[in-house]
Amino acid sequence: MKNGFCTSVQAHLRRRGTPRGFTLVEMMVVIVLTAILLALALPSFNSLIEKYRVEGMASALMASVSHARSEAVRRGQVVTIRQRAECTGADWSCGWETVVGSGTGFEIVRRQDPDARVAVEKSALGSMAFDPIGHFSSVARVDFRPVGSTGSSNDIAVCISLGWRIRLVKGGGTC
């Protein structure tokens, strides 16, 4: 006489001998396919990372400009954004400082550290200053691009006009 319980135990004992899981060959095939797909996808990730680095530095400059303007109004003094002492000419890749005062009696209010993978270049020599009312002293364009590239889609420009209108131009467009 067979009942349901004995039949299920016997079926379970018969299945116990069959191997479960993956074989070593199957696992190696999956690892090789994953490595190939990863190698194909990596160049697009590098471009995306470059884009975010450049956008981050451009956003940092925009934040510095906004901060400098508000500090000029709050203090009732001229506030200047200038390239750090390590930079020369129109190159701002070594960062910038927000400064109140001039000569030997100045105070550094804010300092932006550089990102060695982003090239920063200002269109004209000199610093950017805000008067006590918060007006910008001149027109400026600051270009940001990944180091070593020329004319890529990751290029960004920050354009600042006389009325303190600030805007971001992507892809190397005109201000």
Image (cartoon, rainbow, N blue to C red):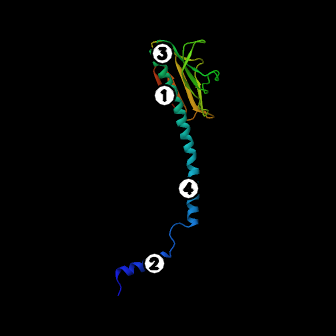
Q: Quadrant of residue 118?
A: top right
Q: Quadrant of residue 119?
A: top right
The answer for how far apart the CA atoms under marks 1 and 4 are is 39 Å
Q: Earlier in the sequence, mark 1 or mark 4?
A: 4
Of badges 1 and 2, the one in the foreground is 2
The answer for how far apart the CA atoms under marks 2 and 4 are is 37 Å
Q: Earlier in the sequence, mark 4 or mark 3?
A: 4
Q: Which residue is mark 3?
A: 72
Name the residue located 51 percent from the left edge and 67 percent from the top edge.
21
Q: Secondary structure at mark 2?
A: helix
The answer for how far apart the CA atoms under marks 3 and 2 are is 84 Å
Q: Is residue 150 above or below residue 71?
A: below
Q: Quadrant of residue 113?
A: top right
Q: Amino acid at mark 2?
A: Leu
Q: Which residue is mark 4?
A: 34
Q: Secondary structure at mark 3?
A: helix
The answer for how far apart the CA atoms under marks 1 and 2 are is 71 Å
Q: Is residue 20 left or right of residue 150?
A: left
Residue 156 in picture, x, y percent from top left: 53, 30
Residue 172 in picture, x, y percent from top left: 54, 30
Q: Which residue is mark 2?
A: 13
Q: Earlier in the sequence, mark 1 or mark 3?
A: 3
Badge 3 crowding class, 10 Å Cα cut-off, few under 14, some 14 to 19, many 20 or more, is: many
Q: Secondary structure at mark 4?
A: helix
Q: Amino acid at mark 4?
A: Thr
Badge 1 crowding class, 10 Å Cα cut-off, few under 14, some 14 to 19, many 20 or more, is: some
Q: Which residue is mark 1?
A: 168
